[in-house]
Image: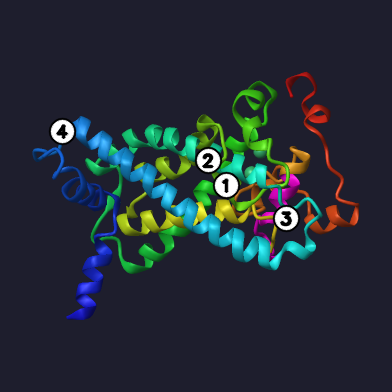
Amino acid sequence: MEALGITARLANLNAHHLVELLNDKLFDPILPSHQPLSISRRLFVTWVFLYFGSLIVYFTFASLDFLIHFRLLAHRCLPENYLQTTQVRREITTSVKSLSIMAAMTTPFEILIQLGYGKIYYDPAKYGYAYLFVSPLLFLAFSDCVIYFVHRALHHPLLYKTFHKPHHSFINTTPFAAFAFHPVDGFAQGLSYLIFVFLVPFHAVVHLASLVVVSCWTMNIHDRVTWRIPGVNGAAHHTIHHTTFKSNYGQYTTLWDKLCGTFRDPHQWKQAGSPTLTEKQVYGKHA
Ligand SMILES: [Zn+2]
Ligand SMILES: [Zn+2]
C-alpha cells in the first residue's frame, strides 16, 4: 500500500499537476479562480511555476556545485584568480533577470503542453517500461544535436554581439554562470527541450526530471572541474569554449564537435600551454 502511495505521489510530480496545485494552494485563497482556468490565470500561474521552479533548481544545485565541486575539490588546480566575487554576483544577477524572461518565453509552449497539444503522456505503461527508460536518452541525443547547431549559429558575427556576447563576458566561469545569458540566447539554446515534446512521446514525470538534470548539467560544465569521461563534453571542454570562442560548442557529448571539425581536446590544449584567444582576435569589429 505504501509503495502505491509513493508511486501516486511521484506521478503527481508533473508540470500540469504542479501548476494546478500552485493555483489551488497559493493563488485561489487570494483571488478565487474558475475551472477550467482562464487563459490569463493559466499564463500567470505557469510563469510563476517556471520562473520560481527554475530559481529553486538554479540556487540549490549551483550552490551545491559551487561549494562542493568547485571550491572544495578544484581550488588547487585552478589559477590564482579562480574566484572573483564581483563576477559571481554578476553571474547571479544576470541569471535571475534572464530566467524571468526565459520563463515568459517558455510559458506559451508549456500551456500548449498542459492543454494536451504535445506528446506528453501520463500512464508510464502506455509505451512500455523499456521506452520509458530509453526516452530520456532520445531527449539528450536530440538536444545535443540541436544545441550544437544553435550554439554555433549564435557564434556567427551577425548574432554574436547582440545575443551571445553577454554569456561570453564570463571567461573564468563558475556554476552560477549556467543561466547568465541574453534571454533570446538562453531560450534559443533551450528550444530543443520544447520541440522534443511536440515530436516524441515523453512521460510527464520523466520530462520534468530530465529538465532538472539538463539544468544541473549546464551548471556542471561551467564549474571548470572535469571528470574525464570519453565522449562526454565536460567542464574542461566548455572552459576551452569560453577561452577560445571557436571550438567545443557541444553540450553533452563531443560527437557533433568531432563530426564538424570543431573539437579541441582538453589534454592536448593543456599540453600546448592552454592558448587562449580574445574576442577581438576572433570577431574583430563585431566583438
Ligand atoms: Zn558560446
Ligand atoms: Zn558557457
Q: What stretch is highlighted in magenta?
A: 227-241
The quadrant where ligand 2 appears is top right
Q: Does the magenta stretch include residue 160?
A: no
- Name which of mark 2 and mark 1 comes first in the sequence: 2
Q: Furthest residue to the left?
A: 34
- Residue hosting label 2: 95
Q: Which amino acid does label 2 sit on?
A: Ser
Q: Of residues 3 and 33, which is closer to you in this image? A: 33
- Name which of mark 3 and mark 1 comes first in the sequence: 1
Nearest-to-viewer mark from 2 and 3: 2
Question: At numbered mark 3, what does the secondary structure look like: helix, strand or loop?
Answer: helix
Q: Residue 124 occupies which quadrant of the picture?
A: bottom left
Question: At numbered mark 4, what does the secondary structure look like: helix, strand or loop?
Answer: loop
Q: How many discs mark residues in the rendered view?
A: 4
Quarter the N terminus occupies:
bottom left
* Alpha carbons under labels 4 and 3: distance apart: 47 Å
- Residue hosting label 1: 178
The numbered dot on residue 38 is: 4
Nearest-to-viewer mark from 2 and 1: 2
Question: At numbered mark 1, what does the secondary structure look like: helix, strand or loop?
Answer: helix
Q: What residue type is labelled 1?
A: Ala
Q: What residue type is labelled 3?
A: Ala
Nearest-to-viewer mark from 4 and 2: 2
Q: From this view, report whether residue 63 is shown above or below residue 166.
A: below
Q: Residue 226 occupies which quadrant of the picture?
A: bottom right
Nearest-to-viewer mark from 3 and 1: 1
Q: What residue type is labelled 4?
A: Ser
- Name which of mark 2 and mark 3 comes first in the sequence: 2
Whole-percent x and y of residue 240? Answer: 75, 47
- Residue hosting label 3: 236
